[in-house]
Image (cartoon, rainbow, N blue to C red):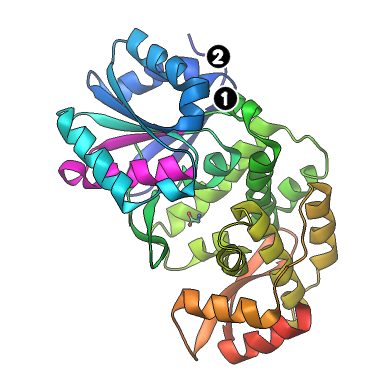
Amino acid sequence: MIMQYRTINVSASRCYNIHIGRGLLAGIGELVRPLLGHCRLAVLTDSNVDALYGNAMMQYLTSAGYDVCKYVIPAGEASKCAENLLAFLNFLAREQMTRSDAVIAFGGGVVGDLGGLSASLYLRGIKYIQVPTTLLAAVDSSVGGKTAIDIPAGKNLVGSFYQPSMVCCDTALMDTLPAEIYRDGCAEVIKYGMILDAALYDTLHTLPFDREAVVARCVEIKRDVVQQDEFDNGIRGLLNFGHTFGHAIEKLSNFGVSHGEAVAKGMVIAARIAPLCGLCNVADELSALLVEYGFDITCGYSAGEIYDALLSDKKRRGGNISVVLPRAVGDCVLHTIPVEELKELLHKVI
Ligand code: GLY
């Protein structure tokens, strides 16, 4: 018997439910059964999640009657690589997984991305279920079907759009997250408020926020965006608020600055640029909220360094670049700027 939980339905190239609730992991067998029937399940997880919750996951699935195997990768972004992709695919083959079997990606963004990509490739595609364990994965990477690995030429350069068959988000799993990892997710939550929901943004001033309600609202926002633009040709770009500059900062720091911290810095840069493009000035308001959450919002790099990293990342010289800028709290737009102009703008705000 599963306790109360919320369900958000996504209608994309595959329709699926995102279930969100505290303690939901205990009911995963019940949630999976109507979806997959009797099949084998391959759980992909990382060393941190395995140590904390690996046994519980295996027990919940086996006691629901599933035949389960498990593959554990080392925790950390370095694991989102071609070697692990191939190793996991080989594992699926050794385990004789068939088209009616499924992968369970049990972890944060690295596990979700690697698990999703593996599922999209193995036997030309088998089902997979996302079980996010970080706030960041719950509100962003587990929803919307983007899967990827990093290659030496860059992050997320090899991937696919491949929707999961279900997302099972147990918010209690986030209780054990180190504060800085939880805070990384908060940057994405603040992002959702800024881009599309002023009411959500306002609730974020009260700390700690209601985790289930906030995760559900962020997932609804992402669901609405993905349903309109699953393959990222337009409005889905709004989800990149703070990410264009954030990615440049991550790269310049050799990934020493975490994703959330970099997105926080990137959102502040974008908010400072907005009034210079004739849009409103919410930079002080946004900066104050980010500081409340403990983010260091100083950029840490010069305008020239950010510009160079940004252009090399986008593999472009000349032409225009699209950045997400706030028009107001809860209202962002995609704004196209000639790259030369962006250089000047960066010099004015950093
Ligand atoms: N994380 C951005 C997206 O899913 O489009």
Magenta stretch: includes residue 283: no
Q: Residue type at mark 2? A: Met
Q: Nearer the viewer, residue 98 or 299?
A: 299
Residue at the (48%, 74%) spot, across then down: 313
Q: On the rendered structure, is 115 left or right of 20?
A: left
Specify whether tag 2 is near ligand 1 (CB below 8 Å).
Answer: no
Amino acid type for the residue under numbered disc 1: Gly
Please identify the dominant SS of the magenta region. helix
Q: Nearer the viewer, residue 20 or 64?
A: 64
Q: Locate residue 95, reporting x and y percent.
A: 18, 27
Locate residue 15 relative to residue 186 in the image: left or right: left
Residue at image coords 30%, 33% = 103
CA separation in Å, label 1 and label 2? 8 Å
Labels 1 & 2 near each other (Cβ < 8 A): yes
- Left or right: 294 in relation to 220: right
Residue designated by label 1:
21
Q: Where the C terminus falls, by quadrant?
A: bottom right
Q: Is residue 41 above or below residue 206?
A: above
Q: Residues within 10 Å of mark 2 (few under 14, many from 20)?
A: few
**How many marks are shown on the rendered structure?**
2
Q: Nearer the viewer, residue 208 or 90?
A: 90
Q: Which mark is residue 114?
A: none
Identify the image quadrant of residue 331.
Answer: bottom right
Compared to residue 101, the image places residue 339 above or below, namely below
Estimate the x, y position of residue 286 in percent, counting from the top left. 79, 59
Picture residue at 52% right of the left edge, 80% below the top = 311
Instruction: Name the residue nearer the viewer: 49 or 172.
Output: 49
Tell me which residue sits at (28%, 25%) in the image. Answer: 41
Q: Which residues are magenta?
A: 109-131
